[in-house]
Image (spheres, grey):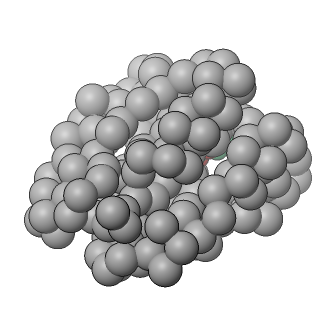
Amino acid sequence: MPRTLANAPIMILNGPNLNLLGQRQPEIYGSDTLADVEALCVRTAAAHGGTVDFRQSNHEGTLVDWIHEARLGHCGIVINPAAYSHTSVAILDALNACDGLPVIEVHLSNVHKRESFRHHSYVSLRADGVIAGCGVQGYAFGVERVAALAGTARADA
Ligand code: DQA
């Protein structure tokens, strides 16, 4: 059966230190917690008749394992890889193994206004869209975009 928003959840992945959202550098990342972000994603997906599978890990290999899970069981991925955006070939390779699956990269902050090491993202080499600098609202935009891309049957599923 083809995977669409109607029959498979959107995988929403959060990388290292995002468990501290709301406490960590609120002047950069805001005061909402990751639980607030999850509630926003649940609401946004529900408005399109979909569901989310919302996860966070501080470990690169765990994120790789979860991308493999999404490859077989989800209708798209919204990912904030956090610091791994700038370092992880392993996460890029895992995403590159997800043929045809919509992938949207989200950053709370505008990484392009920050230190130069944040200007490059390995994940952007695979992402179908990149959202940066919109705060937690960026996650809602990411869910909206996956809903638009995964609302109909995937040709290769
Ligand atoms: C981030 C930006 C990254 O550079 C940083 O390492 C993060 C969060 C963001 O959401 O703005 O941890 O991905």
* Tag count: 0
Residue located at (42% from left, 30% from top): 55
Residue located at (30% from left, 76% from top): 151
Place of residue 116 in the rendered image (x, y in percent of width and height, measured from the top left) = 87, 52
Place of residue 24 in the rendered image (x, y in percent of width and height, measured from the top left) = 51, 24
Query: 84 and 134: which one is in front?
Result: 84
Residue located at (33% from left, 39% from top): 53
The answer to whether residue 125 is left or right of residue 129 is: right
Q: Is residue 30 visible to the viewer in this orientation of the structure?
A: yes
Q: Quadrant of residue 127?
A: bottom right
Query: 89 and 23: which one is in front?
Result: 89
Place of residue 30 in the rendered image (x, y in percent of width and height, measured from the top left) = 41, 40
Compared to 23, does 82 lie above or below?
below
Q: Quadrant of ligand 1?
A: top right
Residue located at (66% from left, 19% from top): 59
Image quadrant occupied by the N terminus = bottom left
Q: Quadrant of residue 134?
A: bottom left
Compared to 107, does 14 lie above or below?
above
Q: Is residue 41 visible to the viewer in this orientation of the structure?
A: no
The answer to whether residue 144 is left or right of residue 107 is: left
Question: Which residue ends up furthest to the front in the rendered image?
Answer: 1
Compared to 38, does 151 lie above or below?
below
Query: 116 and 43: which one is in front?
Result: 43
Place of residue 78 in the rendered image (x, y in percent of width and height, measured from the top left) = 48, 54
